Amino acid sequence: MKKLFIAVSFLSILFCGCNKNSSWQSFSKDKTIEQKVDSVLALMTLDEKIAQMTQFASNGEIITGPASESDVARYLREGTIGSVFNTVTVENNRTVQDAAMQNSRLKIPVLIGFDVIHGFRTIFPMPLAESCSWDLDLMRKTANIAAQEASSVGIHWTFAPMVDIARDARWGRVMEGAGEDPYLGSLIAQARVKGFQGESWESLKETNTILACAKHFAAYGAAEAGRDYNVAELSERTLHEIYLPPYKAANEAGVATYMTAFNEIGGVPCTGSKYLFTDLLRKDWGFGGFAVSDHTAVKELIAHGVAKDEKEAAALAVNAGVDMDMADGVYIENLKKAVEEGLVSESVIDNSVRRILEMKFILGLFDDPYRYLSEEREKSTLLKPEFLETARDAVRKSVVLLKNDNSYFPLDKNKGQTVALIGPMVKNQRSLNGEWAGRGNRNESVSLFDGLMEKYKDSKIRFVYAEGCDLITNDRSKFMQALSVARQADIILVAMGEDFNWSGEAACRTDIRLPGAQQELLKELKKLNKKVGLVLFNGRPLDLSWEHENIDAILEAWYPGTMAGHGVADVIAGDYNPSAKLTISFPRNVGQVPIYYNHKNTGRPVDPANPKVDYRSFYLDVDNSPLYSFGYGLSYTSFSINNLKLDKTSMTKGGSIVVTADVTNTGKYDGAEVVQLYIHDITASVTRPVKELKGFEKVSLKAGETKQVKFEVSEKNLMFYDLNMNYTAEPGAFKLWVASSSADETNEADFELE
Ligand code: GLC
């Protein structure tokens, strides 16, 4: 029936008596998408074109920004809307499509978007957590599962991956990205884009893939003082060396859309930046999809002070190359006037509409606007057992073991002892999915308590429990009860962290210690002179200096999602040997922030042999180094890296050097080590970072086993933006390390580029 309906509707286009040139070309399959797009465009009035460039949030289902009184219902009735977001059920998405199909003149299908950031219904560990797995296949797989679930309810487009490099733990959105490194961030961006979209745009016509969106373009993570939406003041070189690579990599992976960043860069708000959205993205990078503003970001050009009213804001954004306006209605209410007054050429409008229509054709929506909608598919797809198993595996691989003195972990099932489970995150479920929880059911996420009860149900361990405090306030009224429970136990296992609203958008903090009374409770528990382990559920690097000095073991579990309790219990029990490594530095305290491993040397670097010699670049109160470095993470076993070799020490132009090393599991547990390759350009036409990640390999090793890792270093790995901003490699001396973290310089070698 639907097929017939669609045929009828297109026939109505053919004979709609349009007041436009109705030289409609048939939809015969041999027409190219471009020809079909032009055929539709030729029928459209200016109002209808501008409608295609308009996106509104559905009314009230899910709110992800300042509530905008968008009359989406009216626009849907009139059929004058190109896209809707935040509708997350088959029923509501069918209603949206029906509105366009039944009410609009041209019956152009509506594009439906949603923030499928780390899962749709099956919620995976937050993106920063997953990045600590250094497992690109896993990250592609979880994105693919998210696409399968989201598309099953009629969602065509996700506003992900967020690829913003972040070096500042005060910024709440560090939890959404892949950490501080451009090289790793670029590879992860590509894995996630392909997970959502498939291998190419060709695979977008499958109904289990969705458009991806590289966001937030650009340098949103460079917000000054770590305060969300704040200005990004950075050099052109830092922009190109550090912040742009993951966005560029996303384009190389075929990302279909980009989203503007709220911030300005050096005085130019991204949403009005022709340099970003036309010169760089389209002319230099050859991007062929479309760009959407972030939530009300077009209107915000007025607050930024670069547009005096909405008409100017609309003109600035669309002339910059921002094709679609999210949530504020500025395009649909102002662009026609802007065209009539000559502020915007209709050809600019046509280009934007072409890009949007092309995606709708590629998705197959013109063939069948309802092709993604199926109650049966929704029911059979969401929360599939194999999806939940993947989620549990992702949790295991995202948990970072930060400290493990006295072999506190794993907790041996066969060791008869009483363990006191203390803290607000022992039984908490609502925070486990983090802020961007899609359509995940917060009450479904497996708590640590439930995971441990399941894991240890036949063990010799007896658990006792007390909450002790909450995640936010300074209420100490439950301390006494917690201490009383802890006194009954042989050891104490504490679970603490951040409420899910304490990391994420508009969730920035100037104090990055455990919130509320949590650290106070830890200090009271410490006084009992029992071994204490700490499991953390949080979205950002925390200041754990006190914990590191006083707690025996620390496990960073982040916001692990639906299978939190089971995955973390797998690690606690030793059924999975932790293998994750940090992709973002943990500062000793907030005074060090921003802090990152690929920093510059300065003219007065600290001499490690004489760290306090005067007139050097150091702090009086803490060491320059982070508490936990980029690339750091412990295991229940131990590894050694030896026998570093280079097949040559001089690289010719266009040549390469083969680097090998042996990695040995020197402990008693099977495990996996992420072996990292770092390179330093010692002297160049501009200052270079003290080291940069240029390769890694995650190696699984049985206890006692040795394997060789091999890296091929080529000129490409040595390229940077020179004094004249040319991307090139310069001859000279280099150092490299094959290491277990960015702080490990045990295995060092020198080479030169001729
Ligand atoms: C929010 C976020 C953006 C998200 C959008 C739609 O403001 O900045 O990442 O995709 O609105 O929800």
Image (cartoon, grey):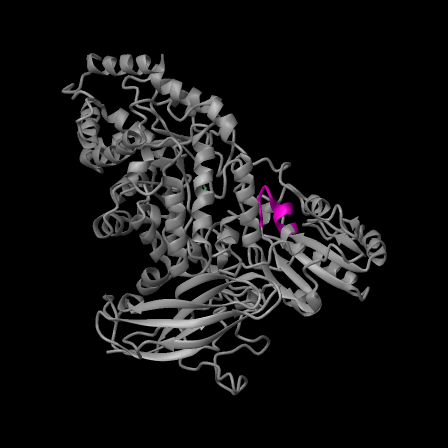
Taking 261 as reference, is 629 left or right?
Answer: right
Q: Quadrant of ligand 1?
A: top left
Residue 604 seen in render: yes
The image shows residue 354, relative to residue 129, as above or below, that is above
- Percent across and percent down for residue 99 are 39, 18
The image shows residue 625, relative to residue 292, as above or below, that is below
Q: How many marks?
A: 0
Is 45 in the magenta? no
Taking 484 as reference, is 48 left or right?
Answer: left
- Residue located at (70% from left, 63% from top): 408
The image shows residue 627, relative to residue 381, as above or below, that is below
Q: Quadrant of the C terminus?
A: bottom left
Residue 265 seen in render: no
Quarter-of-image position of residue 666: bottom right
Of 413 and 635, nearer the camera is 413
- Percent across and percent down for residue 589 are 58, 66
- Residue located at (45% from left, 44% from top): 141
- Residue located at (69% from left, 53% from top): 495
- Percent across and percent down for residue 136 are 43, 52
Of 686 and 402, nearer the camera is 402
Taking 603 as reference, is 378 left or right?
Answer: right
For the record, the magenta segment spans 559-569
Quarter-of-image position of residue 692: bottom left
- Percent across and percent down for residue 218 are 36, 52
Q: Quadrant of the N terminus?
A: top left
Quarter-of-image position of residue 186: bottom left
Of 416 and 335, nearer the camera is 416
